[in-house]
Image (spheres, coloured by chain):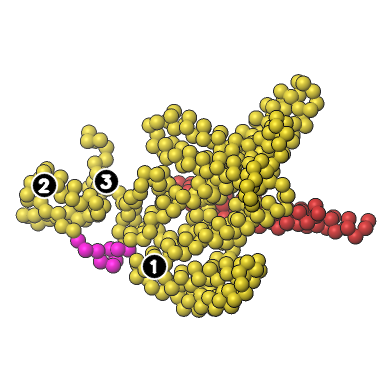
């Protein structure tokens, strides 16, 4: 393999990792929050609105991962 | 009986009694007239001045123009704003559909949401909550159609573009005057990516700046002058960063502005440090994270568009197999687009909501501790 192909391969791999790892982290956080929130909602149903927001908070991780990932993917496609 | 629970709050002697409670400012005259009519001259209604402790726990009634009223639904999620502070309903009413439309950004999807909202609005005329939801969906879908037409030119993904290509052999941009293209975003994916990213961050800067301006006004109204100084410092910080980016990095302004920006930067950090202490200085990093968080606008609109395009590719590949498969491909496309539309209603509204409540509201918002529940007859024949 020449240097160009190596570069493309590593860039694609990094793009995959940045989106994949971030998505996994978000899923983990949201699962924990969701489970705790469902428990809280059983006690206090009026917390439902706050809960939606709490679940939305870890989304930032995967959004950042996506931004970095697409930057790398665009570089790999060049 | 709830009515009796209020009894200990009232006072009475053998000749007189008094009732003390909260009343919206603009209903005082009406109530006074009613009391005179129903009970007679023996009753008088006096307005009391608020002490600073009462100011803290005053219940709040929101008053908004009719176009912003559906968005009061947001205060089902968080407590309404504290008495005397800014009511952000109109602000939300402008920015929520704006952000929603930017994320959805598809003429076809917007149209479907619009039609569904109108149908539900007609069907469930008695349900108040459905009316409120559909009003929000109506405004938001119009915004989505606007961005879908002028910014992205998406009609069910790239379906519209392909149809125009087949029918009239036209390629985007369809329209060009000087530097202006219609649609604005077509062609080089890398260029559109960076355009969208910078636009999302710019919207974030504007959104947060408005939040900080509200923060200054709120803190001055509540006589928290040090906090007002802190918010002012943050506003100055954002302005100085804009100057730094424009003059130092993009080199759109003469280099003199770099020095000006640095002066502003030092001043603003001083202001934040004086106003907010060490907590304020730490908050600077939080503010940066907040601005970067607005890149989700770009990420979500891109992800939605890619999803729609993938559906079209899937269906057209299936359709190319034979005449029977064309029907199957069409059905598949309709089914998958329907799923994508449901996702495009849920996820953009949650994220648009989150950008308001988590990112922007934390800059100025102070929730009330008590909500206003008028004393009234509950149940019984009077209902």
| Mark-to-mark CA distance, 2 and 3 | 26 Å
Supply the letter of whichever chain is red.
A
Q: Position of residue B260 (x, y in %)?
A: 56, 76
**Going 84% across and 55% down the picture, which residue do you hit?**
A8
Q: Is residue B277 above or below residue B173?
A: below
- Residue highlighted by disc 2: B36
Nearer-the-camera pick, B157 or B225:
B157
| Mark-to-mark CA distance, 1 and 3 | 37 Å
Range of residues picked out in magenta = B48-56
**In the figure, is residue B318 to the left or right of B59?**
right
Q: Secondary structure at mark 3?
A: helix
Q: Is residue A21 visible?
A: no
- Residue highlighted by disc 3: B2
Considering only order in the chain, which callout, 3 or 1, is on the residue closer to the N terminus?
3
Q: Residues within 10 Å of mark 2 (few under 14, many from 20)?
A: some
Supply the letter of whichever chain is yellow.
B
State which chain disc 1 sits on. Answer: B
């Amino acid at each position: 393999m020449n240097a160009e192909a190596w570069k493309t391969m590593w860039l694609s791999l990094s793009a995959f990792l940045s989106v994949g790892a971030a998505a996994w982290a978000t899923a983990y956080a949201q699962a924990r929050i969701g489970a705790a929130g469902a428990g809280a909602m059983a006690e206090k149903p009026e917390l439902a609105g706050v809960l939606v927001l709490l679940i939305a908070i870890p989304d930032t991780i995967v959004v950042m991962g996506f931004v970095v990932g697409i930057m790398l993917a665009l570089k790999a496609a060049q | 009986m709830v009515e009796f629970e209020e009894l200990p709050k009232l006072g009475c002697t053998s000749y007189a009694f008094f009732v003390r409670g909260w009343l919206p400012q603009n209903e005082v005259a009406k109530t006074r007239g009613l009391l005179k009519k129903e009970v007679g001259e023996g009753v008088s209604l006096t307005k009391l001045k608020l002490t600073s402790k009462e100011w803290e726990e005053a219940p709040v009634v929101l008053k908004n123009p009719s176009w912003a009223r559906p968005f009061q639904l947001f205060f089902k999620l968080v407590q309404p704003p504290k008495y005397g502070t800014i009511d952000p309903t109109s602000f939300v009413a402008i920015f929520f559909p704006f952000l929603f439309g930017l994320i959805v950004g598809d003429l076809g999807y917007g149209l479907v949401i619009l039609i569904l909202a109108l149908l539900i609005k007609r069907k469930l005329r008695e349900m108040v909550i459905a009316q409120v939801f559909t009003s929000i969906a109506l405004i938001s879908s119009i915004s989505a159609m606007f961005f879908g037409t002028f910014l992205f030119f998406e009609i069910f993904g790239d379906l519209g573009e392909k149809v125009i290509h087949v029918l009239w052999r036209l390629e985007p941009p369809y329209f060009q005057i000087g530097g202006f293209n219609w649609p604005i975003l077509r062609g080089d994916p890398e260029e559109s990516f960076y355009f969208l990213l910078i636009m999302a961050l710019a919207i974030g800067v504007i959104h947060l700046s408005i939040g900080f301006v509200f923060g200054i006004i709120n803190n001055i109204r509540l006589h928290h002058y040090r906090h007002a100084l802190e918010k002012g410092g943050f506003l100055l910080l954002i302005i100085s960063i804009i100057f730094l980016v424009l003059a130092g990095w993009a080199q759109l302004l003469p280099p003199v502005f770099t020095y000006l920006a640095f002066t502003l930067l030092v001043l603003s950090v001083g202001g934040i440090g004086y106003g907010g202490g060490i907590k304020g200085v730490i908050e600077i990093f939080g503010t940066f994270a907040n601005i970067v968080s607005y890149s989700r606008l770009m990420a979500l609109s891109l992800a939605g568009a890619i999803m729609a395009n993938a559906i079209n590719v899937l269906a057209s590949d299936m359709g190319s197999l034979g005449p029977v498969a064309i029907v199957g491909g069409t059905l598949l496309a309709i089914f998958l687009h329907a799923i994508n539309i449901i996702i495009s209603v849920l996820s953009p509204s949650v994220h648009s909501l989150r950008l308001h409540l988590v990112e922007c509201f934390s800059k100025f918002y102070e929730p009330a501790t008590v909500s206003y529940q008028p004393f009234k007859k509950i149940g019984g024949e009077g209902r």
